[in-house]
């Protein structure tokens, strides 16, 4: 476990709630009241990734109980890209909370490596277990919260939610009915750097289900995506299909990616990460591309 406190951190700017519409202001009050009830005297840990959902939970926690009683807990493993780790620290600094890093070992679990549709359960279960074992006592936590929003709660491809239930982890955004659009509005009002950040699922989500998750595959995906972002591409996924990298980019980027000179740079970037072939998916970026078809069939 590694703690990193930023002594120059400051809570979200004063008066930010005045920028909100009445419904959003009411939801903020609901979340704040719930968090104060959860930690009347102790501290709150926020399972933190740097994404917009957990960032808003972190900002609301600072707003509700004060920066001195909040800690962001960042799980670090081969499934977390180095760029995402750095960005998470920047967001926590903007929210006004110190970061505690915990090393997670989901890759030691054969069920996680097996990579079924429930892979995220084992990842979240490992994170929440590590928080309970290493952070709760050391940092005086009375409760832990995470960033499930109301849209997530309605989706069938979120097995991590079961792990949260098993560990009694709070989900204040979902409980207050805050969907993704509302979460982004709050993030903008708090001036969080993640406000318009595209979703960035863990690197293991790029590997088709029932194909083993390995550090080598995760490193290939991370290297390819980092190289593509250096070319100026924003929201993207590199799906790992053995020698083939299936590239998903925004619809408005497809033509440019398929056309010289960018095409040649994209090929070089992805091949440089260890892939032999590059396929461009004409559907563009897809959330839950591997998981949703399986859970929808199962639920039919």
Image (tube, grey):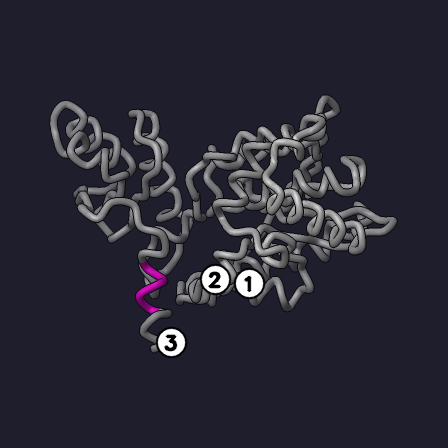
Location of residue 22 in the rendering, given as x and y in whole percent from the top left corner? 62, 43
- Is 144 situated left or right of 203 in this image? right
Q: Which residue bears the numbered disc 3?
A: 299
Q: Which of the image's four quarters has the C terminus?
A: bottom left
Circle 2: element type: loop
Q: Nearer the viewer, residue 127 or 191?
A: 191
| Tag of residue 161 | 1
Q: Are marks 1 and 3 in contact (CB under 8 Å)?
A: no
What are the residue bounds of the magenta stretch?
Answer: 290-294
Residue 25's quadrant in the figure?
A: top right
- In this picture, is 66 found above or below 10? below
Where is 22 relative to 195, above or below?
below
Residue 220 magenta: no
Secondary structure beneath dot 1 equals helix
Q: Mark 2 to mark 3: distance in Å?
A: 13 Å
Image mark for residue 266: none
- Which residue is at the far left? 260
Q: Residue at x 63, y 28 (%)?
A: 94
Q: CA distance from mark 1 to mark 3?
A: 17 Å
């Amino acid at each position: 476990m590694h703690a990193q406190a930023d002594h120059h951190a400051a809570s979200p700017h004063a008066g930010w709630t005045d920028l909100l519409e009445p419904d959003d202001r009411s939801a903020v009050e609901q979340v704040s009241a719930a968090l104060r009830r959860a930690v009347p005297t102790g501290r709150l840990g926020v399972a933190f990734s740097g994404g917009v959902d957990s960032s808003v939970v972190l900002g609301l926690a600072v707003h509700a109980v004060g920066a001195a009683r909040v800690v962001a807990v960042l799980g670090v493993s081969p499934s977390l890209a180095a760029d995402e780790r750095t960005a998470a620290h920047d967001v926590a600094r903007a929210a006004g909370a110190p970061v505690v890093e915990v090393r997670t070992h989901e890759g030691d679990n054969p069920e996680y490596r097996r990579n079924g549709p429930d892979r995220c359960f084992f990842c979240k279960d490992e994170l929440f277990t590590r928080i309970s074992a290493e952070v709760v006592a050391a940092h005086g936590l009375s409760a832990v919260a995470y960033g499930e929003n109301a849209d997530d709660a309605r989706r069938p491809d979120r097995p991590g939610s079961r792990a949260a239930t098993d560990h009694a982890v709070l989900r204040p955004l979902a409980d207050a009915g805050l969907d993704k659009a509302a979460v982004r509005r709050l993030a903008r009002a708090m001036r969080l750097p993640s406000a318009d950040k595209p979703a960035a699922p863990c690197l293991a989500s790029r590997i088709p289900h029932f194909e083993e998750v390995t550090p080598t595959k995760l490193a290939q995906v991370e290297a390819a995506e980092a190289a593509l972002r250096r070319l100026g591409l924003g929201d993207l996924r590199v799906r790992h299909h053995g020698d083939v990298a299936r590239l998903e980019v925004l619809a408005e980027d497809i033509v440019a990616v398929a056309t010289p000179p960018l095409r040649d740079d994209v090929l070089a970037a992805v091949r440089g990460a260890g892939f032999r072939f590059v396929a461009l998916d004409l559907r563009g970026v897809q959330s839950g591309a591997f998981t949703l078809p399986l859970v929808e069939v199962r639920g039919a």
